[in-house]
Amino acid sequence: MKLAALFLPAALALAAPMAAHAQLTKEYQRLQDFGAELDHVATAPDFVGLAIAVVKDGRVAMVKTYGVREAGGTEKVTPDTVFRIASLSKGFAGTLAVMEQSEGKLNLQTPVATIVPEFKLKRAADAARVTLEDVLSQRTGLPPYAYDNLLEAGRPPSAILSEYAKVKQTCSPGECFTYQNVAFNMIAAAIEKASGKTYAAEVQSRIFEPLGMRTASIGLNQLKSTGNWARPHKRFGPQNWVSTPVTDWYYRVPAAGGVNASINDLSKWLIAQIGLRPDVIPVAVLDEAHRKRIATPPETARQRSLKTPVTETSYGLGWRNYTYAGRPVITHSGSVEGYIAQIAWVPENKSGIVILSNTRGARAARIVPAWLDYELGLQKTDWFKMDEITTASATTASGD
């Protein structure tokens, strides 16, 4: 018995690393299984070009690219192929605004009308109450996607802001969540005033360059100037896609939807958002940008209708917060004509995923919940339903 007691501490010391190794092996196998499922899903007629990166324990653990930059072409999608990322742009705006605030250049409690006097609401007193924080957290009180149709018709964003005086508000500022693009872009003017630079130049110098996002940019001309960019596509019949011209509508609201990036760029952005580049983005800045500002009950209901295990949703500053199978997840999606983009991570695991596609096939939006199930070790769900032919466009994880 004494001999056994002497060996017990040594046995326990050996057991701990063995258990850790077994857990790592299990997690690695789950990642391999997820990769194999992606290889199968990428054969579906939902895609022309697709790029995916997975970060595990703060490191890039997987990069996969599929297909071509343009239907009928031979130029393959690579890790440096640039896509539009649409509303993933909002996370850059929210993060940068908090960086500027932390340096004393910007105050998010400033009424936005003092910076953007064109901004009007039906009740003038309400317009005077809307702060920069309200803009970033989608709490302006306007109806969802207010006057995006005018933006798509060619109306200048500054002219649209004054038209809001004609719109019946959904609620008073600060009291409800209503997703915006044109109104969200008012944060760009605040950042320009604080920095003395154009919005694009400030994002470039404060985020893209320090993080080594060498192919990231803002603007239509910048997208086209790279020799390696994915063309957008529209569905033509149940299993065919045709390339379509790039529209400039949402490039005119750059903070809301103007960023272009490759999967290599976004893997670096993901690692920074997880908190592993404090030399560029301090953890305190991330905590403030990610912090929940307002609940989004309609999104919770929508997730329930999609049968995801999401039980709670809310919005921070350009970022969504989900509770997925009891675990916190930070996420955002983007969708613009011919493109879809998604980012999501589990903060406590320091693991995440980014997805870029130059089509809006429905299965693209199912990659995030599939990855989360693998990452969290949940029971496998058949998210992709490969035996079905779908002609639906993607309904993204955040409906953006």
Image (cartoon, rainbow, N blue to C red):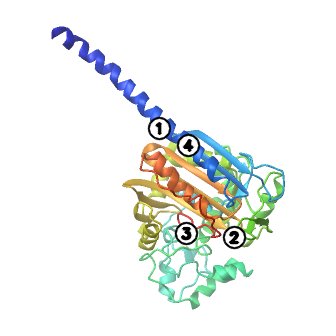
Position in image of residue 91 (x %, y %): 57, 59
Instruction: Tell me the crowding category of disc 4: few under 14, some 14 to 19, or many 20 or more residues within 10 angstroms, Cα based.
Output: many
Residue type (three-letter) at the residue carrying disc 2: Tyr
User: Label 1: few (<14), some or many (≥20) within 10 Å?
Assistant: some
What residue sits right under mark 1 in the picture?
Answer: 27
Q: Earlier in the sequence, mark 3 or mark 2?
A: 2
Q: CA distance from mark 4 to mark 3?
A: 24 Å
Amino acid at dot 4: Val
Mark 1–mark 3 CB contact (< 8 Å) = no
> Which residue lies most toward the front here?
387
* Displayed quadrant of residue 243: bottom right
Q: Earlier in the sequence, mark 2 or mark 1?
A: 1
**At numbered mark 4, what does the secondary structure look like: helix, strand or loop?**
strand
Where is residue 275 shown, x and y percent of the image? Answer: 50, 45
User: First in sequence: mark 1 or mark 3?
Assistant: 1
Count every numbered label the image shows and give the total.
4
Residue under the point 71% across and 78% down: 152
Check disc 1 and give the amino acid type. Answer: Glu
Q: Residue furthest left?
A: 1
Closer to the camera in the image, 26 or 147: 26
| Tag 4 and tag 1, C-beta contact below 8 Å | no
In the rendered image, which residue does mark 4 sit on?
A: 55
Q: CA distance from mark 2 to mark 1?
A: 39 Å
Q: Which residue is mark 2?
A: 250
Residue under label 3: 399
Q: Quadrant of the C terminus?
A: bottom right
Residue 338 is left or right of residue 324, and the answer is right
> Is any atom of residue 90 visible in this view?
no
